[in-house]
Image (cartoon, rainbow, N blue to C red):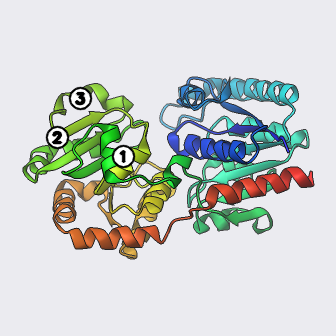
């Protein structure tokens, strides 16, 4: 079998990395497969996908801007043009199936595929689905859900809870020593990994900045992913035990090196942290639909599988919780063991199996 697939999704790492994980698994199972990505012009997928070794075409599309309505004047034109672009791409490539992982570009692509009778699979990462996937649900053939909580938003006859696909490298765990060697950090020291998502998280960066002296006083080695948006602002804090980077390419090494993680509570981050069994202090983003990050983190905290601090209390509550986690090894072990029980280690394989069935039945 040599399937031809178009995979579309992007805007953020939360849509891009599941798409790449699916593509990598397809290539592992079917080395002769042909995969084309479709993304949104000028978004991060346009350089992340080629870096991973895949071809990508960009659509002139963006979401509605809810803060500045004037910016939406071009939206109808962008949507119409992106539909024509998607139509041309699909007709030229002639895929056996299309996959949408959310984000602006997957809308026109999956819509056009449905009109042409090409089977489609949606992969929804969140407990509270994005607008694009909700709108495409009636047209898709199969919907793979990262969370059981999303089931109520989709037709039961075509939905299945698979968990979220995570990068293949995370399925081959490495030792702390090896991870530290790759990142060129000290393997002996207690290591705190701070993640704010691919673009960065302003509040997390401010909290780390405000408590950087406290962290250093506890002899903690810090790996601080501040995000591309904040790289210039925080690079000056780098010193011997404080490693400040805009983005971490080798997350397998970063997780291996980490004794403790501070993170946003996006669906993909949670899936990876569950798989790696890492004790985590979540600081959910309040700027997401349905406040789903807080609900994600709360469900883990309720099961003693993680700790959480919400942003509006973080100035008071962040440091006491972080300090306890740094100092209490037994508690960290409990959280690490419990969070691992929420992992879906076979998510990517199950999704590719569903995709294969879709192509075979067509």
Residue 84, relative to residue 171: is it above or below?
A: above
x 52%, y 30%: residue: 44
Q: Quadrant of residue 23?
A: top right
User: Which structural element holds mark 3?
Assistant: helix
| CB contact under 8 Å: marks 2 and 1 | no
User: Which structural element holds mark 1?
Assistant: helix
Q: Residues within 10 Å of mark 1 (few under 14, many from 20)?
A: many
User: Which residue in the structure is indicated by mark 1?
Assistant: 254
Q: Earlier in the sequence, mark 1 or mark 3?
A: 3
Does residue 135 appear left or right of residue 308 in this picture?
A: right
Q: CA distance from mark 1 to mark 3?
A: 18 Å
Q: CA distance from mark 2 to mark 1?
A: 15 Å
Q: Residues within 10 Å of mark 2 (few under 14, many from 20)?
A: some
Q: Earlier in the sequence, mark 2 or mark 3?
A: 3
User: Which residue in the structure is indicated by mark 3?
Assistant: 235
Residue 238, image x, y percentages: 19, 32
Residue 349, image x, y percentages: 67, 57
Q: Nearer the viewer, mark 2 or mark 3?
A: 2
Residue in the foreground of this view, choosing between 132 and 356: 356
Residue 172, image x, y percentages: 50, 53
Q: Earlier in the sequence, mark 2 or mark 1?
A: 2
User: Which residue in the structure is indicated by mark 2?
Assistant: 241
């Amino acid at each position: 079998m040599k399937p031809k697939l178009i995979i579309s999704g992007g805007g953020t790492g939360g849509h891009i990395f599941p798409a790449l994980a699916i593509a990598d698994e397809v290539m592992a199972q079917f080395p002769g497969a042909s995969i084309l990505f479709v993304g949104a012009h000028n978004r991060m997928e346009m350089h992340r996908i080629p870096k991973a070794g895949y071809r990508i075409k960009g659509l002139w599309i963006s979401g509605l801007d809810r803060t500045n309505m004037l910016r939406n004047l071009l939206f109808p034109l962008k949507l119409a043009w992106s539909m024509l672009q998607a139509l041309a791409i699909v007709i030229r490539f002639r895929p056996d199936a299309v996959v949408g992982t959310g984000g602006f570009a997957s809308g026109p692509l999956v819509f056009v595929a449905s009109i042409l009778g090409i089977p489609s699979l949606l992969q929804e990462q969140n407990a509270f689905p994005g607008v694009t996937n909700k709108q495409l649900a009636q047209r898709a053939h199969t919907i793979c859900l990262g969370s059981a909580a999303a089931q109520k938003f989709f037709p039961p006859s075509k939905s299945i809870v698979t968990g979220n696909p995570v990068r293949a490298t995370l399925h081959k765990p490495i030792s702390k020593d090896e991870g530290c060697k790759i990142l060129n950090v000290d393997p002996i020291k207690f290591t705190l990994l701070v993640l704010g998502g691919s673009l960065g998280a302003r509040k997390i960066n401010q909290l780390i900045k405000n408590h950087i002296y406290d962290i250093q006083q506890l002899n903690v080695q810090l790996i601080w992913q501040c995000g591309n948006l904040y790289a210039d602002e925080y690079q000056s804090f780098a010193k011997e035990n404080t490693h400040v980077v805009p983005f971490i390419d080798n997350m397998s090494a970063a997780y291996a090196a980490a004794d403790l993680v501070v993170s946003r509570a996006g669906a993909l981050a949670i899936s990876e942290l569950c798989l790696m069994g890492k004790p985590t202090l979540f600081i959910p983003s309040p700027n997401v639909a349905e406040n789903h990050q807080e609900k994600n983190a709360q469900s883990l905290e309720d099961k003693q599988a993680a700790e959480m601090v919400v942003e509006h209390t973080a100035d008071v509550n962040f440091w006491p919780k972080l300090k306890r986690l740094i100092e209490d090894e037994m508690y960290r072990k409990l959280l690490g063991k419990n969070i691992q029980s929420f992992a879906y280690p076979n998510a990517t394989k199950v999704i590719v199996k569903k995709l294969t069935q879709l192509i075979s039945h067509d």
